[in-house]
Amino acid sequence: MSAVRGVAAGGVAVRGAPFLLASGAEARISNVGASLAVVCVNGGQGRAVPGTWSATLEWLVERLAPRFADVAFSEVRYRVRSWKHLPTCIDDARAALDAAVAGGARRCALLGFSMGGAVSLGVAAHPAVTAVIGLAPWLPRQLPVDALLGRRLAVRHGALDRYLPGVPGVHPRSSREGTERARAIGVETDYALIPGSLHAVALRAPWGRPVALPQAGAWLAFVAGELELFRAGR
């Protein structure tokens, strides 16, 4: 694993070079060696395409990692980024959790964007996981929520999020119903909509950098608040 621990001059977290996980997917880590870790899992689409780095997760990690220097952030690039290959994506997330534990993490949180919500459900039973944070998560009825027992589930969804032809999106109904199913079996939950927000937090610009969308600051504040609870062991 090629990476450097800590925060560089100017308060910028050092992100390590991508490395192969046991599943064959890739991960890159900011704040390597920390005793707490957040595994960040991306969305997907119907067509089977190679994995990419999530602009939403990258934008968030670049701002959270300097503030939470005692927390490692592992961004996962799936082998195949498609909900039709969900078991493969789940295997990739599980491999990232195992790598985080092998790297020194004693507790892990999952940060799942879009399809990453379903991926998070698929690996929530991992013994290191204590919290799941969903960003506009797809939580399909077919997936059980029992693995969330004993863990905290916190979800935010853009109030304007919708699926439109050619435009990625997840209706808030999916995350609300999934959260309600979890609450009904005794899971600690927190759910709210973000007014004026769409599906993503950021998009990838033609020059390669993530560019924030409206209400990105509200998403950032939500995740930061959840990480404070996670760090405190709540």
Image (cartoon, rainbow, N blue to C red):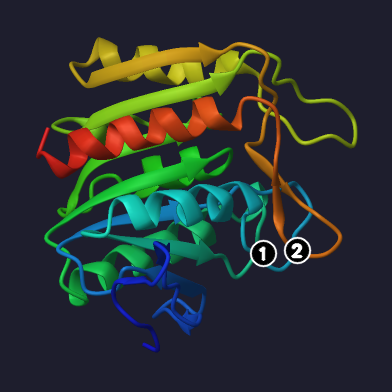
Dot 2, crowdedness within 10 Å: few (<14), some or many (≥20)? few
Left or right relative to 21: residue 124: left
The residue labelled by disc 1 is 52
Residue sitting at x 17%, y 44% = 231
* Residue 163 seen in render: yes
Looking at the image, which residue sits at the far front? 10
Spot occupied by residue 205 in the image (x, y as percentages of width and height): 81, 55
In this view, 37 is above or below 77? above
Whether residue 168 sits left or right of residue 120 in the image: it is right
Q: In the image, what residue type sits under mark 2?
A: Val
Helix, strand or loop at disc 1? loop
Residue in the image at 46% along x and 50% along y: 63
**Other residues around mark 1 within 10 Å, as few (<14) / some (14–19) / many (≥20):** some
Circle count: 2
Front residue of this view, candidates 13 and 41: 13
Circles 1 and 2 in contact, beta carbons < 8 Å: yes
User: Percent from the top left, x then y, of residue 72?
Assistant: 29, 62
- Residue 49 is tagged as 2
Nearer to us in this view, 93 or 48? 93
- Mark 1 belongs to which amino acid? Thr
* Residue 140 visible: no
**Which quadrant of the figure has residue 172?**
top right
